[in-house]
Amino acid sequence: MPEFCDKLRASIEKISPHAVDEILPLQTFGNSNTYSIKCANGHRYFLKRYLFSNSDLRNRQETERNALIFLNKNTNFSTPQFIGGDLQTKINLFEWIEGHQVIEPSERDIMGVLDFIGHLSDI
C-alpha cells in the first residue's frame, strides 16, 4: 500500500497547486475511489480515482471534468471547481465543498434537486 500511496501522491502533486500533506480515503464505489486531500497550507481538495471496467468503456473521467466545467460556466449552483487531472493514473482533483450526506431528504432538499434539474433543462 505505501508504494501505491507514493504513486498517488506524486500524481496529485503534479496537478495540485499546493503540496500534499495527507491523503484520506473516503468511499469506494463500484467504479471509483474517493479521497480527501489535505495540504500543508490548510487547503483541502476532493480526489476521485476512476477504476477501469470492461463493462463500461465510457471515459467517465473526461465526462465528469467537462460536466463540471460546463456547470461552473453556466450556473450559479454550488458545484466544485475542477482543479486538474492525470489521465495516466485516472484521477481528477476538485475543489473541496463542505457538506454532508443526505440520508433522509427534506422538502427543501427535494426542491433544490428539482430546481437544479429545471435549470439544466433550460441550459
Image (cartoon, grey):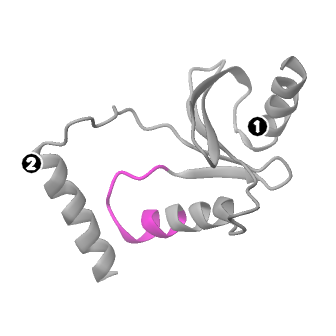
Q: Residue at x 9, y 48 (%)?
A: 107
- What are the residue bounds of the magenta stretch? 69-80
Q: Position of residue 33 (x, y in %)?
A: 64, 38
Under circle 2, the secondary element is helix
The x and y percentages for residue 68 are: 51, 61
Image side of residue 70 versus residue 78, left or right:
right
- Packing grade of label 1 (10 A; few <14, some 14-19, many >=20) is many
Q: Nearer the viewer, mark 2 or mark 1?
A: 2
Callout 1, which amino acid?
Ile
Quarter occupied by the C terminus: bottom left
Q: Quadrant of residue 10?
A: top right
Q: Residue furthest bottom?
A: 122
Please tell me which residue is depicted at 53% across the width and 64% down the height of the picture.
Answer: 69
Q: Nearer the viewer, residue 47 or 106?
A: 106
**Which residue is outermost to the left?**
107
Residue nearest the observer in this picture, 72 or 87: 87
Calculate the distance from the C-alpha at mark 2 to the C-alpha at mark 1: 38 Å
Q: Which residue is mark 2?
A: 107
Give the image location of residue 36, x and y in percent.
58, 28
Residue at position x 76%, y 61% in the image: 54
Q: Quadrant of residue 32?
A: top right
Residue 120 among those drawn in magenta: no
The residue at which mark 1 appears reads as: 12
Q: Which mark is residue 65?
A: none
What residue is drawn where x is 41% and y is 53%?
79
> Please, what is the three-letter code of the amino acid marked with disc 2?
Glu
